[in-house]
Amino acid sequence: MKYAPMIVVSLLTLAGCASSQQSSAKQETQPAHEQQTHEEHALHNLHQLTPELWSAGEPVGEDAYAELASLGIKTVISVDGVAPNKELAAQHGISIVHLPIGYDGISEDRSVELAHAIATMPRPIFVNCHHGKHRGPAALCVGAIGSGDISNEQASAYMTLAKTSPKYKGLWEAAEVAQPLSGAVLYDDSIELPEEAQIEDFIEAMAEVDRHYEHLQDCADNNFNAPEDHPDLAPISLAGQIHNLLRGMEDDKETAEGGPEFYDMLIVSRDRASELETRLEHNDIKGAYESLKLLTDSCSDCHTKYRNNS
């Protein structure tokens, strides 16, 4: 497959702002290519951070994995609730890692795991979330700072290019505070990189959805702003986390046991949470209230049929 990638515009000319620890030979190889936009391809929101580090939305289907192979990608790291497709990756000689994160930030442990993966997995490396705008670029940058590939300034420029919303304050903060790791930490053989992470069980995930929903209602009561008694809440992050949790339940054993109708209800709620997140991202407050009502209705219908009568 012929492919001309979307390349970062003069992003890596910021090398002069990097710390002395990051003015290594590998940073000197970072290009300042001319950006090219290509709408017809299987990988959405595709961007290149360095010659060996990429991010985009979730690769779905044969065409997406073939396109990864055409870029020379050797490792796919998913930070979404859904793990990479093991079979398709194997067909193209691609290793996979699953290190899911939320929209509210990146923990210290996960930051170390991301840096370890970027330092030790075969390159080039591709990092994806669902849409390729928020969690994926942030995770790639945090890991690349930890591995010594880029500086914090370069991370900020890259996340801006990828259109990571400033409303995801936790993701931006993670990239701002990330630091290069020592070799002892970076190459610690005890760090595990699972192909499919063990997501919290169904009941715990549903309880987490409920908690996020309650906080989201508090924000909705304040015109989708954080209430005074809970200034740390970010409605767009809450909607994104609900969407991510519901998406992670799609292949759960209990979802399968619930049957086709339960699965369909889950998908409806998932899509309404995604729509709510999108409307909040675009400051469409009226639309956000409409989406929240639809999400509330779909969750209530499901609870009535499956939870309240169980």
Image (cartoon, rainbow, N blue to C red):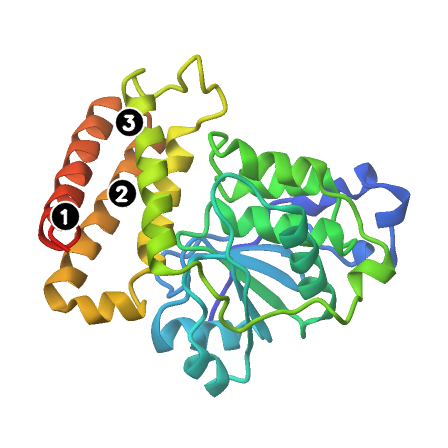
The front one of 302 and 87 is: 302
Q: In the image, what residue type sits under mark 2? A: Ala
Q: Is residue 132 above or below residue 98?
A: above
Residue position marked by numbered label 3 in the rendering: 217
Quadrant containing the C terminus in the rendered view: bottom left
Residue at point 25% right, 50% down? 270
- Separation of marks 2 and 1 at Cα, in angstroms: 21 Å
Label 2 vs label 3, nearer the camera: 3
Q: Are marks 2 and 3 in contact (CB under 8 Å)?
A: no
Residue position marked by numbered label 2 in the rendering: 273
- What percent of the width, then of the height, locates residue 289? 20, 26
How crowded pointer 1 is (Cα within 10 Å; few <14, some 14-19, many 20+) is rated as: few
Q: Is residue 181 above or below residue 19?
A: below
- Separation of marks 2 and 3 at Cα, in angstroms: 13 Å
Tally the numbered discs.
Answer: 3
Element carrying mark 3: helix
Label 3 vs label 1, nearer the camera: 1
Residue position marked by numbered label 1 in the rendering: 308
Residue at point 41% right, 63% down? 82
Label 2 vs label 1, nearer the camera: 1
How crowded pointer 3 is (Cα within 10 Å; few <14, some 14-19, many 20+) is rated as: some
- What percent of the width, then of the height, locates residue 105? 55, 41
Farthest right residue in view: 20
Element carrying mark 2: helix
Q: Are marks 3 and 1 in contact (CB under 8 Å)?
A: no
